[in-house]
């Protein structure tokens, strides 16, 4: 199949986004003429350093922090690893980490590694809408807690967590607060000072920059152990010659995302139309919170069918969606996020995520709404357990 010539309704923006043409234009000079090493003292190097400093200042301005509080990394996963392992290894005496059951594997598997190294991790549950259970969280955070790590927005069901409130609980107990904001930055307003967090991660490829660039905000004064030692890049905290083109692309993509925030009203209208119409299909339920959710996230479960079969039929009809997180889509295990909300395994298996963005249109939603009911109907006809 030649996917370059096929018209595709791309509704999988939580998995990744296309690199924006403006981002390509901003990056191109960094490959062609401005390719110096920012650590070099000659003009070529200093020009690259200017680009690096400028990108850092622009991103810091958007997130409400100082330039020196922002560190570039290779991706969201690295930022998550650094925040959590870095805090654990720099912690003096405290051994507990409190996180949620619905975190991305970049957080959950990092916590599991630390458990093997003698740290204690408490995985706090969520309610049926996917909001962290605050009583459970309050009970889990004590004076042995070094870090609370709760994601700002969930990648599968789009639920937005009360991060400010969670940060207050962490701080009242002398713990640090980290939020994985990979799905939030660029989609909703994010200001680190307003949230009151000590660390916040995000990633380029979710917001129109290339894959392979991310960043971590670390509040001034917070001590993190280095994850990547090397030459003194990133103020001596993250070795490796900086990826100037991608960092420049990240700054541009974030600026464009901010300009496009007013378009969220339209995206929310498309989202809600999609949800309301899909819920008219019998035996269908919405996953996640009806209002505390990302503008573009639609996650529904269709009973009596497998999400994977549905996905393949949608693909055949030119619609790109997902059964859950892109990272776990190769596995047929039911989503840990849906199970944590209390969804029975059978329903979790029939789940489907659409993630809309600025580039989607009402016509895209029309096509999805034409194809999904037909495909669901056909698959159910073949199902021996469908009551009819
Ligand atoms: N955290 C969340 C919430 C995500 O959705 C993702 C990617 O899907 C990541 C972390 C990992 O980001 P990256 O792909 O840049 O490593």
Image: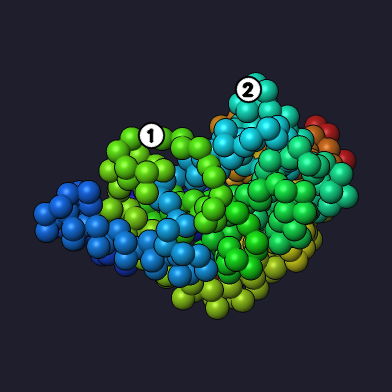
Q: Quadrant of residue 34?
A: bottom left
Residue 135's x, y, as percent?
88, 50
Q: Residue at x 46, y 64 (%)?
A: 66
| Distance from mark 1 CB to nearest ligand 1 atom below 8 Å | no
- In the visual, does 72 lie left or right of 185? left
**Observer-nearest residue: 296 or 117?**
117
Q: Quadrant of residue 190?
A: bottom right
Q: Quadrant of the C terminus?
A: top right
Q: Nearer the viewer, residue 133 or 230?
A: 230
**In the displayed structure image, the side of residue 173 where residue 208 appears, left or right:** left
Percent of width and height locating residue 317: 53, 51
Which residue is identified by label 2? 117
Secondary structure found at label 1: loop
**Which residue is at a point 77% across and 54% down the rendered structure image?**
172
For the point 37% across and 44% down, the residue is 236
Kindly indicate the quadrant of the structure image that contains residue 219. Answer: bottom right
Q: Nearer the viewer, residue 310 or 322?
A: 322
Element on which disc 2 rests: loop
Q: Position of residue 160 (x, y in %)?
A: 70, 59
- In the rendered view, tell whether residue 134 sits above or below residue 359: above
What percent of the width, then of the height, locates residue 150? 68, 48
Dot 2 surroundings within 10 Å: few (below 14), some, or many (20 or more)? few
Identify the residue shown where x is 45% and y is 56%: 70
Q: Which mark is residue 229?
A: 1
Looking at the image, residue 330 lies above or below residue 319: above
Compare residues 146 and 356 and report the one nearer the observer: 146
Quadrant assignment for the N terminus: top left
Question: Local crowd at mark 1 within 10 Å, few (<14), some, or many (≥20)?
Answer: few
Q: Is residue 367 visible?
A: no
Residue 82 shown left or right of residue 352 in the figure = left
């Amino acid at each position: 199949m030649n996917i370059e010539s096929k018209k595709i309704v791309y509704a999988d923006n939580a998995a990744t986004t296309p690199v924006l043409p403006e981002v390509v234009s901003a990056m191109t000079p960094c490959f062609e003429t401005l390719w110096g090493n920012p650590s070099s003292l000659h003009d070529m190097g200093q020009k690259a350093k200017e680009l690096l400093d400028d990108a850092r200042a622009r991103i810091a301005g958007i997130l409400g922090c100082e330039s020196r509080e922002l560190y570039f990394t290779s991706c969201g996963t690295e930022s998550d690893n650094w925040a959590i392992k870095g805090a654990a290894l720099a912690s003096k005496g405290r051994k507990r980490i409190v996180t949620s059951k619905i975190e991305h594997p970049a957080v959950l598997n990092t916590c599991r590694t630390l458990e093997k190294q003698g740290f204690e991790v408490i995985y706090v549950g969520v309610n049926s809408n996917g909001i962290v259970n605050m009583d459970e969280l309050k009970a889990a955070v004590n004076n042995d807690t070094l870090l609370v790590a709760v994601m700002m927005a969930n990648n599968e069901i789009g639920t937005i967590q009360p991060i400010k409130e969670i940060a207050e609980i962490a701080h009242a107990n002398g713990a640090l607060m980290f939020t994985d904001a990979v799905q939030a930055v660029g989609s909703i307003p994010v200001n680190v000072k307003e949230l009151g967090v000590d660390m916040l991660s995000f990633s380029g490829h979710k917001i129109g920059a290339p894959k392979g660039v991310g960043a971590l905000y670390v509040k001034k004064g917070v001590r993190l152990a280095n994850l990547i030692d090397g030459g003194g890049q990133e103020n001596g905290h993250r070795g490796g010659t900086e990826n100037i083109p991608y960092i420049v692309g990240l700054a541009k993509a974030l600026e464009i995302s901010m300009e496009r925030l007013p378009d969220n009203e339209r995206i929310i209208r498309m989202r809600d139309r999609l949800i309301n119409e899909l819920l008219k299909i019998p035996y269908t339920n919405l996953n996640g919170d009806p209002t505390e959710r990302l503008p573009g996230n639609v996650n529904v479960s269709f009973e009596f069918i497998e999400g994977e079969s549905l996905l393949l039929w949608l693909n055949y009809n030119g619609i790109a969606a997902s059964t859950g997180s892109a990272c776990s889509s190769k596995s047929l295990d039911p989503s840990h996020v849906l199970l944590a909300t209390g969804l029975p395994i059978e329903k979790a298996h029939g789940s489907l995520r659409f993630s809309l963005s600025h580039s989607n249109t009402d016509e895209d939603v029309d096509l999805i709404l034409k194809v999904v009911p037909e495909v669901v109907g056909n698959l159910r006809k073949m199902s021996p357990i469908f009551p009819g």
